[in-house]
Image (spheres, grey):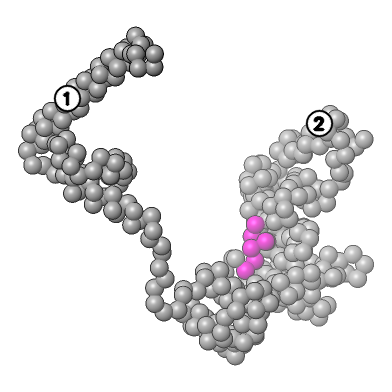
Amino acid sequence: MSNVIQPFHLLVIALAGWLNRHQQDLIDYLIEENRVLKEQLEGQRLRFTDEQRIRLAVKAKVLGRRLLDELETLVTPDTLLTWHRKLIAQKWTYARTGPGRPRLAQEITDLVLRMARENTSWGYDRIQGALTNIGYVVAPNTVKNILKRHGIEPAPERKKRTSWKTFLKAHWDVMAATDFFTVEVWTARGLVTYYGLFIMHLSTRSVHIAGVTTAPNGAYMKQVARNLTDVSDGFLLNSRYLIMDRDTKYTEEFRDYLDREGVKPVRCPVRAPNCNAFAERFVRSIREECLDRMILFGEASLRRALREYVLHFHTERNHQGVDNQLLKPLATVSSTDEPIHCRERLGGMLNFYYREAA
């Protein structure tokens, strides 16, 4: 019974034969198509991408050289098998380290430069020790070479000079800055230039308008110095240094009076506005946000505008230099359920959005 061929078996054999003939016909067609393509190319060199080479090399290895010769492939069997060998070689190729000492990590170089600039008295050994504290082991000579390569002098030369940044950081809590700004005001005499003088505590960014005048002469400036150092409510009572530029309006009388009262004037180098950057930034802010957007009639309107802006600056304006926070918030947000209000100053020129305290 088992040796008798069943009708089902005959069907399978017939189907297999048909598939073989169909597959062979397909192969014959592809071979002929390849011949036609090669004739069209007439010896021109084909350019394959790496991804295409990999695909062909993988298939070529399965077929073998003899079958590839029969198939009249566009690429010669030798080329296909060479690609396959290169594919295997890439799999087992590892990055090799070259001869000599390994390159120094950029992070170490940056740290050496930072430590040298921020600590002018630190020598090679001191910097090496500081690096060891944070897990980097380098030789003092490596530190020396890094500094030399970047044009930084040895500690004995560096510590003779104090950078402006180092000076500010060392005296931050007792440091103030001052500057003038000008405003054109319409008066009965026509358009008159007023000079505004302000003082800023650098540690808190608090601002005080110290004077508004059309004539900042020696007598006027001396009186301003008296007011700033008054023992009862002087704005500079807790300050020891006052940064200013070399404007002639900072008269000798003004500077001498401050010095006698324990506030040392620190004059910026010529043409170095960045040395008084906080004051320069306040001038820009008050101009762009207030004064340049108003037509002022009389000194009283100017003083009112300045008063409103300073109040807005302290309690309603966010400052990027202090993490985008308010300097002196009048209230804290305890709930987002309360309605939102807008407080307008100077006719809506300065706006502050807030919620009513619960």
Residue 210 in view:
no
Nearer to me, 84 or 131: 84
Q: Is the magenta stretch mostly helix, strand or loop?
A: helix
Task: Give the label on residue 340, or none.
Answer: 2
- Residue type of the residue flagged with mark 1: Tyr
Residue 126 appears at what percent x and percent y? 65, 85
The quadrant holding residue 262 is bottom right
**Magenta highlight range:** 275-281
Point 66% across, 41% down: residue? 294
Mark 1 or mark 2: which is in front? 1
Mark 1, other Cα within 10 Å: few <14 / some 14–19 / many ≥20? few
- Residue type of the residue flagged with mark 2: Ile
Residue 124 appears at what percent x and percent y? 59, 86
Instruction: Say if 300 sits above or below 342 in the image.
Output: below
Is 277 contained in the magenta span? yes
Nearer to me, 189 or 74: 74
- Residue indicated by mark 1: 29
Residue 332 in view:
yes
